[in-house]
């Protein structure tokens, strides 16, 4: 093993972060496009233009979601088990919303019927808007702590309800997440289109960018003054075999700011959310869409990173039995599995980035009404 | 204790979603190579008709692929939503192949499928062919990693139980990758997919020929399908996963059950062509056997014995008894993890821990175990014989029927007069559903035959579920079945519509039934 166990535990916290951010940047922009589809596309041809900006790429991008799920399964199995079974209906809502995407993209333009097409357009809207909303709500609940505990054989029991997830702070986090993804998608759309659609997409980017930054600020203030935050109160042996029941944890309002005091450099992460967000707003307004896209990608790193850094080392705090909270130290796989998955990720991730970039470069350029007419039978 | 209703509904939901998923997967796995073949011919000969073939069959491939993706998303997450304890207990091993599948295979497949459809005018011929090949490689690698994960459930190698973390942990990654059961399953499953792809093209081409339309297009497609299908069905039958049966106890139990082999016979065992299994009496009321054949197939030898179900039962009964001790020692050890004597005692019996856990279905504490319950737990380790016996036979019978069809189709393709043999074309047309039926039967044998375990000998199914309410399960099951049924109807509608329209749907002006739509 090239790294010891504690180092791998931290590396995997970073790698899960990389996968979540990768998902938000890549699948996020086509979800944002899906969310905007019914509003920026005013007739069938415009909507086909919008859809075809992501047509060749949405499927590859969606694999960030699948791989993220697989990586959490492999690296943090008890998090995968506890979170997805606890958030049962939320998770099903995400899956069912995602059902609309493959079929929506591929089937929509295969039939010449206005009702058929408009139905799938709204399906693509659901598939674009619901997942970021629910992921935001889930993060909002993670920050507050989730009602679960384990029995002594580590069977997880969730004592909350679906409706309990929809509390005010979580809904705010859902708004931040949806605004962030829609902002990012709008910038992408502005980059790949021209004329009316580009104009509408730019307006949408300005609205959702401001909404994201405002929501992010309110959420930050809420965390600073709110009643949640957890801290480990027992000694931590970072090299220990993972056992989520071996520690004590206390609810400590304001604890989510502790890491910024301990390591002031981490304040660069929320700063990146602001810097990226503001730069993206300015650039998209100036029509510099490609650099705006890069900037909004950094904003995503900042927003998701802020949630991660604030909670570190917590991944999934328990509100009912805080000692059962899952952390990067005690919710992980074995040293060997973390090592093997590290190599798999380090080897394949650059290859994936390389061929994905190639795919985008092959399909680069504006998608226009003329393109749709020329490719009547093969375009989405 | 977990309610049996919850376990049954969780199983039903997994079975339903997995079987829906596998309506689409084999066609993807097989069609993708047919596309590679057609496009290779196009690149080598420059004949446009082969490009049209790639694009038309690719269109149908895409309609199918969309639902493969849709139903596949569910499976990646259903272990977490519905099988939480399973995910915790074996995630250290089982999660890795799923994640690697994403990294190594699914990204490749999904990225290049976009270029396959949209890159025709932007890539050179060679580049586009490379894209198609990479898509095919991705698809097949995807199957490899999924079957490595599944093979480990059948034959859990390269891992051991850790009492400190209360879960199975990886000890040898390469043993998991090169698990012979997984490798056998991979070859068998992808070959079955190739047969499915070939049958799809063969049947629809036969239909065009019966109607006398798009004849050149259909004839070329038929020939490729006949050759590819014949090679594939031979692979399914000859290289089938039978070679894996003699390896590992799960496969031996399954083999005994699907052959209705109650008693261990002197080697080489006979093969039951037809039998009427009597579960309660643990015997067959009637059986028609062929001497020697089973022993030859199952062990590839004349002198190795295959254990019958009664013998497996006797062995497992002893393992349950030891397993009870293992569970008790584990409970003590969890309270006193530093006790070296306890640890030593546990290490001696921990191989049978899973058999002790079977009793958790009946009692919360191992102190309440009675000899009757030990009998019951041991009896639980034998899967129900009749369903396995018959589904296996349907699969095999259909396999041989397809062998005959592809053999004749290839023979007459070589002779060159297949298009005039209407009986052959009709036979090809009506055989369309056969590969799907066989695939579903095959998965039924593999997974139903693994019961009562999720991980054979390690983790019983009834312990693997999430602690959800029965009502949640009714709701989600209804949702999945509802969604999938609607989507399946939509998919079938489009598939039939475009298959009927034929290559004219490409709008090239070279075929019948051209679409000429004024732009909307």
Image (cartoon, rainbow, N blue to C red):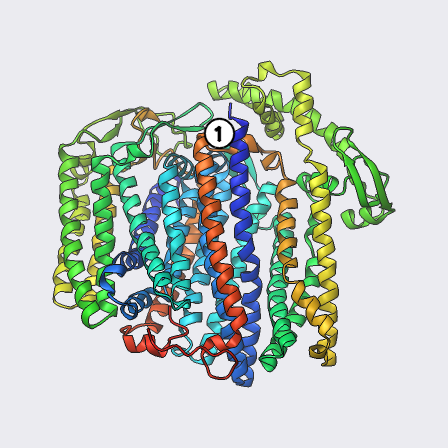
Residue B172 visible at all: no
x%, y% of residue B506? 46, 76
Snapshot quadrant of residue A377: bottom left
**At 52% across and 52% down in the image, what residue appears?**
B21
Q: In which quarter of the image is residue B322?
A: top right
Residue B377 located left or right of residue A6? right
Residue B475 picture location, percent across and down? 44, 37
The residue that appears at 21% across and 68% down in the rendered structure is A197
Question: In x, y percent, where is residue B262?
Answer: 79, 35
Q: Is mark 1 on a helix, strand or loop?
A: loop
- Closer to the camera, B337 or B223? B223
Residue A345 visible in the snapshot: yes
Q: Mark 1 lies on which chain?
A: B
The extreme top residue here reads B367
Mark 1 surroundings: few (<14), some (14-19) or many (≥20) residues within 10 A: some
Given residues B80 and A54, the one toward you in this image is A54
Rendered view: A234 above or below A128: above
Image side of residue A321 versus residue A221, left or right: right
Report the residue marked by disc 1.
B166
């Amino acid at each position: 093993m090239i790294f010891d166990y504690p180092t791998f535990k931290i590396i995997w916290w970073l790698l899960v972060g990389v996968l979540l951010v990768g998902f938000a940047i890549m699948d996020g922009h086509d979800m944002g496009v899906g969310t905007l589809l019914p509003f920026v596309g005013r007739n069938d041809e415009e909507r086909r233009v919008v859809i075809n900006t992501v047509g060749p790429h949405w499927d590859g991008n969606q694999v960030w979601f699948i791989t993220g799920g697989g990586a959490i399964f492999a690296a943090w199995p008890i998090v995968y088990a506890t979170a997805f079974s606890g958030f049962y209906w939320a998770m099903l809502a995400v899956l069912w919303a995602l059902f609309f995407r493959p079929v929506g993209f591929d089937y929509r333009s295969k039939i010449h019927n206005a009702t058929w097409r408009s139905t799938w357009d709204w399906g693509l809207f659901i598939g674009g808007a619901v997942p970021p909303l629910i992921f935001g709500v889930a993060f909002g609940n993670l920050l507050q702590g989730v009602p679960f505990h384990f029995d002594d054989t580590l069977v997880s029991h969730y004592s909350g309800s679906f409706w309990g997830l929809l509390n005010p702070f979580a809904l705010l986090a859902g708004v931040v997440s949806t605004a962030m993804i829609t902002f990012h998608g709008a910038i992408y759309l502005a980059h790949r289109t021209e004329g009316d659609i580009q104009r509408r997409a730019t307006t949408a980017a300005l609205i959702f960018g401001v909404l994201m930054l405002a929501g992010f600020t309110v959420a930050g203030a809420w965390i600073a003054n709110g009643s949640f935050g957890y801290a480990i109160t027992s000694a931590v042996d970072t090299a220990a075999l993972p056992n989520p029941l071996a520690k004590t944890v206390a609810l400590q309002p304001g604890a989510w700011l502790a890491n910024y005091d301990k390591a002031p450099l981490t304040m660069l992460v929320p700063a990146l959310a602001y810097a990226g967000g503001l730069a993206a707003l300015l650039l998209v307004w100036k029509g510099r869409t490609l650099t705006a896209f890069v900037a909004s990608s950094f904003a995503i790193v900042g927003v998701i990173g802020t949630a991660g850094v604030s909670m570190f080392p917590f991944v999934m705090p328990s509100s009912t039995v805080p000692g059962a909270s899952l952390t990067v130290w005690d919710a992980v796989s074995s040293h060997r599995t973390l090592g093997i998955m590290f190599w798999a990720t380090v080897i394949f991730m650059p290859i994936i980035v390389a061929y994905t970039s190639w795919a985008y470069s092959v399909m680069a350029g504006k998608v226009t009404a003329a393109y749709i007419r020329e490719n009547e039978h093969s375009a989405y | 204790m977990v309610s049996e209703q919850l376990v049954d509904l969780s199983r039903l939901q997994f079975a339903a979603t997995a079987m829906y998923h596998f309506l689409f997967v084999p066609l993807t796995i097989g069609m993708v190579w047919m596309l590679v073949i057609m496009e290779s011919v196009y690149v080598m000969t420059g004949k446009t008709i082969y490009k049209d073939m790639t694009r038309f069959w690719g269109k149908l491939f895409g309609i199918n692929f969309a639902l493969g993706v849709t139903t596949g998303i569910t499976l990646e997450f259903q272990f977490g939503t519905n099988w939480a304890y399973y995910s915790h207990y074996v995630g250290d091993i089982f999660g890795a192949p799923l994640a690697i599948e994403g990294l190594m295979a699914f990204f490749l497949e999904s990225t290049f499928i976009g270029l396959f459809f949209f890159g025709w005018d932007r890539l050179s011929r060679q580049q586009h062919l490379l894209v198609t090949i990479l898509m095919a490689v991705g698809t097949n690698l995807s199957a490899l990693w999924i079957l490595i994960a599944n093979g480990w459930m059948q034959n859990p190698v390269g891992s051991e139980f850790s009492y400190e973390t209360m879960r199975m942990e990886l000890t040898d990654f390469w043993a998991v990758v090169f698990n012979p059961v997984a490798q056998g399953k991979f070859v068998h499953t992808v070959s079955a997919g190739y047969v499915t792809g070939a049958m799809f093209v063969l049947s629809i081409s036969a239909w065009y020929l019966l109607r006398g339309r798009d004849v050149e297009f259909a004839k070329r497609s038929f020939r490729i399908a006949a050759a590819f299908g014949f090679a594939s069905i031979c692979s399914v039958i000859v290289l089938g996963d039978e070679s894996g049966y003699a390896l590992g106890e799960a496969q031996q139990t399954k083999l005994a059950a699907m052959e209705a082999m109650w008693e261990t016979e002197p080697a080489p065992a006979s093969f039951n062509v037809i039998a009427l299994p009597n579960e309660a009496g643990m015997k067959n009321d009637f059986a028609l056997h062929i001497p020697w054949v089973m022993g030859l197939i199952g062990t590839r030898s004349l002198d190795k014995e295959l254990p019958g179900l009664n013998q497996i039962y006797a062995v497992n009964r002893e393992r349950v008894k030891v397993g009870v001790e293992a569970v008790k020692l584990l409970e003590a050890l969890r309270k006193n993890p530093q006790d070296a004597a306890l640890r030593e005692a546990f290490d001696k019996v921990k191989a049978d821990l899973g058999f002790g856990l079977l009793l958790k279905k009946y009692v919360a504490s191992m102190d309440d175990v009675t000899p009757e319950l030990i009998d019951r737990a041991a009896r639980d380790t034998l899967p129900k014989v009749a369903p396995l016996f018959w589904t296996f036979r349907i699969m095999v019978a259909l396999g041989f029927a397809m062998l005959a069809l592809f053999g004749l189709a290839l023979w007459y393709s070589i002779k060159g007069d297949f298009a005039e043999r209407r009986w052959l074309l009709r036979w090809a047309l009506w055989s369309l559903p056969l590969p799907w039926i066989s695939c579903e039967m095959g998965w039924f044998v593999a997974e139903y035959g693994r019961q009562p375990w999720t991980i054979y000998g390690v983790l019983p199914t009834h312990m693997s579920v999430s602690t959800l309410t029965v009502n949640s399960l009714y709701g989600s099951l209804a949702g999945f079945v509802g969604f999938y049924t609607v989507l399946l109807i939509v998919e079938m509608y489009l598939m039939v519509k475009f298959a009927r329209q034929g290559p004219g749907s490409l709008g090239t002006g070279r075929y019948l039934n051209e679409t000429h739509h004024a732009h909307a």
